[in-house]
Image (cartoon, helix red, strand yellow):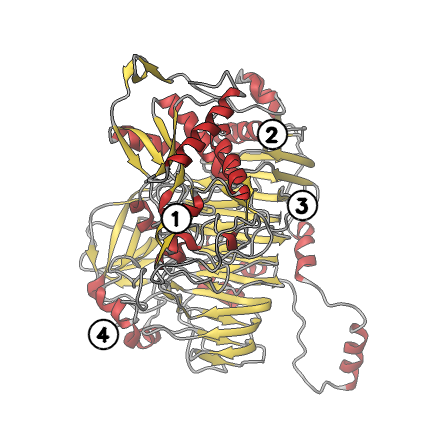
């Protein structure tokens, strides 16, 4: 029996999950969502004692705050697993770097959401605060099921239990088989690059704790959110636990600087907080301002996280893909409680194969620029409870497009007392989505009950929590009262009461969030805690007392020419050169790692192989592979939708990552062929060039070489799609480059723009080329381990090579002390 045919029949028989049979619906909601959140709500979020105090100072406070975090990380945890809090005193604390929490029991706290502001300053696109533990590891043991398992179950029958005992952590894995993919119609999504789902690409993994064993039946602590087939699912012991716990960020504002002259500026911090390899942690009473990406992003290795009483205001970015995903989760048992967002895109969204259950409870998006809901493949077991999307949609269903290969995004998900401009609720094959008490225009063949009416209870999440843990646990949610008049023809006394109330605006969720502190006070007095200066003095690190620490250029293993040979430390520079990936990639975690190196590839909020590569890890790989050099050129195109090799203007700016960043900055004006703003070829992308500069520094330190290809001829003399999004194309910049529009695609396919591109008699292009070549040289003024090349695949004319050499010579004549 497949998951679709069995899920309801077995769910009705399951006694392991909470079933709410509703008066207005003959079908139950089979999933208990109430384990989503910190400690599954079995205890309240704790208040960690203050251990270190950091006062605001002018300049960069990255090192000082990180030193305080590191000090608290070194303390012994108390019986609650808490080491202590770093308290940022009232005022503005500027951070030019990124703060990293890698130990359990560490809390970063301010003195109030309107009092303490932590500012991500500078041009770097980094995440302001990263919470990163180590991965949980599973053993190679696979114990397959002895029976099918329904949606919402917390018990399973396995073939044997010899490897398990109560208290063990296990991973339940549901395989994405060829048959299941075919059942979903996901084998292909039409012609062209991208294709459909591949077996193994949509496996779902739930991490659970065994609570009881009876014969071959195992009971665990939270429900399964997609039905399991006996032959296609198994459990494995988690052999080592690397996840960090009891980490909190609370009681402050996080803000990013940006260029006020450009309302679409993206040369600033993208994400405020990201978490990975973390459990039983929280973000509470935090306001976010001006970030380009997410306020909070919880990735696939997070579990039992609460994000509550948070407000995101005035994001600054292009209006495009993978921007402004304000509150985003890929985890399991994560809860977003009373969160508010303005001008976001996919404000309350769920990512790739999120295992669930996950919940958004009493959340609101104002003037939303895109819909909320699961936005990547097969997120199962998501609850939207009292969620209001102003000006956009809530979507459970199918997301088309073969490049992203998303397909069915929501399965076994529930809408409860939600409102939006449009609510879409579609059932995928083999699963169900429900809508109860929704207010909107409606689309879809899901289960619809009490549309344009309110459901009782007001909150499904609170009712399930009360059923599981009692009234005290439900009361700790502190839900905002939502007065609802149930009668369209109230009696006179009630009508007079409503008329009197109409003279004042109704209570607003944002105001209720800002008033959270009296309801849920967070201790913010320094007491006798140490000052960070005491820690710095004790650790004999005087540089941490400076307001700003300049970047150090380490060049202790220089590339030199000795008797006509390239040498490093007196030895011949011998080895292979590694190439960068030009365009391919994926943001699906299991696939990203296979797409090679690229130091200017960018995935918002994500660091690691195939995402935004860690530059030191790139150097490690080069050395391990016997490579002496990395051969770098800019990418074929920025947006992976162009992987289809079509030349058409894109329908919108929903660009698809990973992004292959280009050397030039976006202007914030006009619309390029990819749907984002046009480039300004007189200005340069700070993130792109800083990444190259940082890697050049690493090359000097590690004895490596960077081959820097100034140009990339593939864009101007090959398939026409390579020119379609090129910054040099006239349609894509504000600089009047003078290339013909529309482009003269030969045979409606190929492009031959090399003759025009290399024509340095054109006054506009000549000046732009000179400025760009000088930027290529300026960026590496203090780096000896960089070799400049004209262009990858260069077969251009002699006159352009002479022009390039003349420009280099003129630049060198102005800087006689540049490295040889």
Q: Residue at x 65, y 40 (%)?
A: 117
Q: Give the residue number, with chain letter if any, for mark 4.
A: 1
Q: Give the residue number, with chain letter if any, for mark 3.
A: 260
Please say if 652 is above or below 815: below
Please say if 735 is above or below 30: above
Question: Disc 4 or 3, which lies upstream in sequence?
Answer: 4
Of badges 1 and 2, the one in the foreground is: 1
Of badges 2 and 4, the one in the foreground is: 2
Q: Element type at marker 4?
A: loop
Question: Disc 4 or 1, which lies upstream in sequence?
Answer: 4
Q: Is residue 178 left or right of residue 207?
A: left
Q: Element type at marker 3?
A: loop
Question: Disc 2 or 4, which lies upstream in sequence?
Answer: 4
Res 802 → quadrant: top left
Q: Few, some or many C-alpha atoms within 10 Å of disc 2 (few <14, some 14-19, many ≥20)?
A: many
Q: Residue at x 29, y 46 (%)?
A: 594
- Distance from disc 3 to disc 2, alpha carbons, whole Å, reads 23 Å
Q: Give the residue number, with chain letter if any, for mark 2.
A: 61
Q: Is residue 42 visible?
A: no
Q: Position of residue 226 (x, y in %)?
A: 34, 66
Q: Position of residue 158 (x, y in %)?
A: 21, 60
Of badges 4 and 1, the one in the foreground is: 1
Q: Look at the image and tell me in which quarter the C terminus lies.
A: top left
Q: Look at the image and tell me in which quarter the N terminus lies.
A: bottom left
Q: Few, some or many C-alpha atoms within 10 Å of disc 1 (few <14, some 14-19, many ≥20)?
A: many
Q: Which mark is residue 73?
A: none
Q: Say if mark 1 contacts mark 3, CB within 8 Å.
A: no
Question: Disc 3 or 2, which lies upstream in sequence?
Answer: 2
């Amino acid at each position: 029996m497949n998951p679709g045919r069995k899920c309801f029949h077995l769910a009705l028989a399951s006694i392991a999950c909470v079933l709410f049979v509703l008066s207005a619906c003959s079908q139950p909601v089979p999933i208990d969502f109430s384990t989503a959140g910190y400690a599954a709500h079995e205890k309240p979020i704790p208040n960690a004692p203050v251990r270190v105090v950091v006062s605001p100072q002018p300049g960069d406070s990255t090192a000082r705050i990180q030193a305080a975090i590191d000090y608290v990380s070194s303390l012994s945890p108390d019986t609650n697993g808490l080491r202590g809090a770093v308290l940022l005193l009232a005022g503005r604390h500027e951070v030019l770097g990124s703060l990293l929490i890698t130990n359990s029991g560490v809390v970063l706290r301010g003195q109030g959401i309107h009092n303490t502001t932590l500012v991500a300053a500078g041009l770097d696109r980094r995440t302001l605060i990263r919470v990163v533990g180590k991965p949980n590891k599973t053993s190679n043991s696979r114990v397959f099921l002895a029976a099918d398992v329904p949606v919402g179950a917390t018990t399973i029958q396995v073939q044997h239990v010899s490897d398990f005992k109560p208290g063990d952590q296990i991973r339940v894995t549901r395989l994405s088989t060829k048959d299941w993919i075919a059942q979903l119609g996901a084998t292909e999504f039409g012609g062209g690059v991208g294709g459909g789902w591949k077996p193994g690409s949509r496996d779902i993994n739930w991490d659970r704790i065994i609570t009881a064993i009876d014969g071959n039946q195992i009971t665990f602590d939270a429900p399964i959110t997609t039905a399991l087939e006996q032959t296609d699912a198994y459990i494995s012991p988690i052999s080592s636990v690397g996840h960090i716990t009891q980490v909190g960020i609370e009681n402050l504002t996080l803000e990013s600087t940006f260029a006020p002259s450009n309302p679409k500026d993206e040369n600033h911090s993208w994400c405020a907080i990201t978490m990975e390899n973390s459990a039983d942690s929280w973000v509470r009473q935090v306001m976010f301002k001006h970030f380009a990406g997410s306020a909070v992003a919880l990735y696939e290795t997070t579990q039992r996280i609460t994000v509550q009483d948070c407000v995101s205001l005035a994001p600054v970015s292009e209006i495009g893909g993978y921007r402004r995903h304000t509150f985003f989760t890929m985890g399991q048992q994560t809860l977003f409680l009373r969160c508010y967002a303005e001008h976001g895109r996919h404000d309350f969204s769920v990512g790739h194969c999120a295992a669930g259950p996950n919940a958004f409870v009493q959340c609101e998006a104002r003037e939303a620029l895109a819909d909320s809901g699961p936005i990547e493949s097969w997120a199962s077991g998501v609850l939207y409870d009292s969620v209001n999307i102003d000006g956009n949609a809530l979507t459970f269903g199918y997301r088309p497009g073969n490049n992203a290969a998303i397909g069915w995004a929501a399965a076994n998900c529930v809408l409860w007392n939600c409102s939006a401009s449009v609510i879409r609720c579609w059932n995928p094959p083999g699963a169900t989505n429900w809508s109860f008490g929704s207010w909107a225009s409606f689309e879809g063949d899901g289960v619809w009950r009490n549309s344009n009416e309110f459901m009782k209870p007001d909150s499904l999440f609170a009712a399930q929590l009360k059923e599981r843990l009692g009234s005290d646990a439900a009361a700790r949610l502190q839900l905002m009262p939502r007065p609802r008049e149930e009668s369209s023809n109230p009696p006179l006394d009630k009508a007079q009461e409503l008329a009197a109330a109409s003279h004042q605006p109704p209570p607003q969720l944002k105001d209720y969030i800002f008033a959270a502190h009296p309801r849920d006070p967070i201790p913010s007095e320094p007491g006798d805690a140490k000052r960070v200066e005491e820690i710095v003095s004790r650790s004999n690190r005087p540089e941490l007392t400076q307001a700003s620490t300049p970047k150090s250029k380490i060049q202790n293993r220089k590339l030199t020419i000795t008797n006509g040979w390239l040498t490093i430390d007196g030895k011949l520079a011998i080895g292979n050169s590694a190439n960068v990936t030009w365009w391919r990639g994926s943001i699906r975690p299991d696939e990203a790692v296979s797409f090679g190196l690229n130091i200017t590839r960018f995935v918002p909020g994500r660091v690691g192989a195939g995402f935004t590569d860690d530059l030191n890890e790139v150097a490690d790989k080069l050395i391990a592979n016997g490579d002496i050099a990395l051969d770098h050129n800019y990418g074929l195109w920025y947006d992976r939708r162009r992987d289809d090799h079509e030349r058409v203007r894109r329908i919108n700016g929903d660009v698809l990552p990973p992004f292959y960043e280009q050397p030039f900055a976006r202007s914030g004006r006009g619309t390029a062929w990819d749907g984002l703003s046009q480039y300004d070829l007189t200005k340069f992308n700070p993130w792109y060039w800083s990444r190259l500069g940082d890697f050049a520094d690493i090359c000097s330190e590690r004895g490596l070489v960077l081959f820097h290809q100034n140009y990339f001829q593939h864009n101007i003399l090959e398939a026409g799609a390579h020119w379609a999004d090129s910054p040099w194309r006239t349609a894509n910049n504000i600089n009047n480059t003078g290339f013909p529009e529309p482009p003269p695609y030969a045979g409606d396919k190929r492009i031959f723009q090399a003759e025009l591109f290399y024509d340095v008699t054109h006054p506009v292009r000549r000046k732009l080329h000179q400025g760009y070549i000088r930027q290529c040289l300026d960026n590496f003024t203090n780096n000896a381990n960089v070799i400049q090349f004209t262009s990858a695949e260069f077969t251009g004319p002699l006159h352009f090579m002479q022009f390039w050499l003349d420009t280099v010579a003129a630049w060198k004549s102005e800087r006689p002390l540049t490295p040889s």
